[in-house]
């Protein structure tokens, strides 16, 4: 499958614009750590991953901020950081306000 980057960019932009209209310019993310599957195991869905690691939303966000500020150059890894941030935002916008996330509080 080929992914058209311009179409992907438009989908991301359209989605973020809609979220901004609904929720404002910021999303409170009450979690920081998440399970991370090594890239070589991520798409082998018929074999259980031999290992899991832990990723950190705040660390991924710091990397992306440095890219946005021109302090770091974007790399393919930045797409993985974007994915984790988008996943954390989607999770945060969908969880009920009464759900306890204190066992995984973010910064």
Image (cartoon, helix red, strand yellow):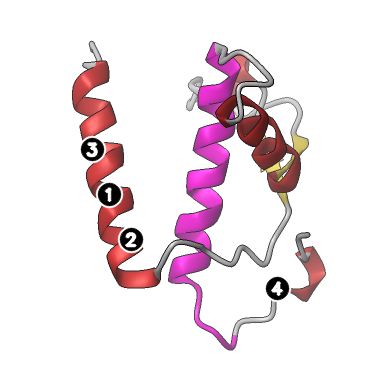
* x then y, percent, for residue 11: 23, 37
The alpha-carbon separation of the residues under discs 4 and 2 comes to: 22 Å
Q: Residue 52's quadrant in the figure?
A: top right
Q: Which residue is mark 4?
A: 101
Residue position marked by numbered label 1 in the rendering: 15
Q: Residue at x 22, y 20 (%)?
A: 6
Residue 47 visible? The answer is no
Q: Which sits earlier in the primary sequence, circle 4 or circle 2?
A: 2
Q: Is residue 17 above or below residue 38?
A: below
- Camera-near label (4 vs 1) is 1
Q: What kind of element bears circle 3?
A: helix
Pinpoint residue 48: horizontal percent, then vertical percent.
62, 30
Q: What segment carries the magenta color?
A: 76-98
Q: Is label 3 in contact with label 1 (beta carbons under 8 Å)? A: yes
| Of marks 4 and 2, the one in the foreground | 2
The foreground one among 52 and 77 is 77
Residue bearing mark 2: 19
Could you tell me how far apart the alpha carbons at marks 3 and 1 are, in whole angstroms?
6 Å
Q: CA distance from mark 1 to mark 2?
A: 6 Å
Q: Residue furthest bottom?
A: 98
- Choose the circle earlier in sequence order: 4 or 1: 1
Q: Position of residue 101 (x, y in %)?
A: 70, 73
- Report which residue position mark 3 lands on: 11
Say which element carries label 4: loop
Q: Are marks 4 and 1 in contact (CB under 8 Å)?
A: no
Looking at the picture, tell me which residue is in the foreground, 78 or 99: 78
Vertical placement of residue 22 versus 86, above or below: below
Residue at left offset 23%, top offset 11%: 2
- Along the horizontal axis of the image, is 7 left or right of 31? left
């Amino acid at each position: 499958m080929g992914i058209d980057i311009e179409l992907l960019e438009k989908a991301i932009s359209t989605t973020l614009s809609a979220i901004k209209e609904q929720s404002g310019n910021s999303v409170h993310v009450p979690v920081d750590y998440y399970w991370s599957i090594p890239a070589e195991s991520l798409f082998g869905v018929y074999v259980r991953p031999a290992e899991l690691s832990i990723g950190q939303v705040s660390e991924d966000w710091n990397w992306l901020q440095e890219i946005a500020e021109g302090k770091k150059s974007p790399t393919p890894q930045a797409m993985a950081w974007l994915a984790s941030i988008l996943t954390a935002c989607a999770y945060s916008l969908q969880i009920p306000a009464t759900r306890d996330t204190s066992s995984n509080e973010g910064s």
